[in-house]
Amino acid sequence: MHDPLSSGAAERSAQPHPDSSPIVVNCAIVTVSDTRTPNTDRSGELAQQLLLAAGHQIGMYRIIPDEPTRICAELEAAATAVPTINAIVFNGGTGISPRDNTYEAISGILTKTLPGFGEIFRFLSYQEIRSRAIASRAIAGTYGRLLVFSLPGSRGAVQLGMEKLILPELVHLVTQST
């Protein structure tokens, strides 16, 4: 008897739309912090390491203060001044303290949002940090042709977001947004 649930299961990928060929994505990493330096930016360093290990490139890396105008300027620079950038990953400034401005700066200018990114990020975070996950304002979307991801600044949050959400979908999302 033919079992339709097991038929072809070995051939199917875990991804709903497996990527047919490897694509190198050129990424920008922007750490939003009033205190971090290149020597203390462990989250930005981790994001870069994970992207490089996955075969992608880093075309821009910056540490900027948590100022809305600077955040928007970096987003604009990645979209226009460095036209080879396909995706930008912000880390930091997504909480609710008075100095956390990344969400406000980015959310208002995204062309399209990916609500599922923040929803799933908070769900996954809840499994690790319980109710503190409600304070995360992770967001993703597009800015013109550029993919935009914004994660909390902790190393754990960057690792979670990169490994569970961004890296598995980066190539697929880039092919959809260009």
Image: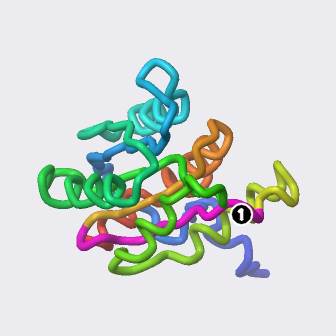
The image shows residue 73 at horizontal and vertical percentages of 26, 56
Q: Residue furthest right?
A: 130
Residue 141 in the magenta stretch? The answer is yes
Q: Residue at x 54, y 47 (%)?
A: 92
Q: Residue at x 39, y 66 (%)?
A: 173
Q: Nearer the viewer, residue 170 or 161?
A: 161
Which amino acid does the dot numbered 1 rest on? Arg
| As drawn, 33 above or below 128 | above
Q: Residue at x 54, y 71 (%)?
A: 16
Q: Which residue is mark 1?
A: 122
Q: Quadrant of the C terminus?
A: bottom left
Estimate how packed mark 1 is, as few (under 14), some (14 to 19) or many (20 or more) residues with alpha carbons within 10 Å.
many
> Label 1's element?
helix
Q: Nearer the viewer, residue 78 or 12?
A: 78
102 with respect to 119 (left or right): left
| As drawn, 136 above or below 7 | above
Residue 107 in the magenta stretch? The answer is no
The image shows residue 105 at horizontal and vertical percentages of 42, 66
Q: Nearer the viewer, residue 34 or 79?
A: 34
Per the rendered image, the range of residues in magenta is 134-145
Q: Quadrant of the N terminus?
A: bottom right
Q: Residue at x 59, y 74 (%)?
A: 116
The image shows residue 160 at horizontal and vertical percentages of 65, 47
Q: Residue furthest top?
A: 39
The image shows residue 110 at horizontal and vertical percentages of 37, 75
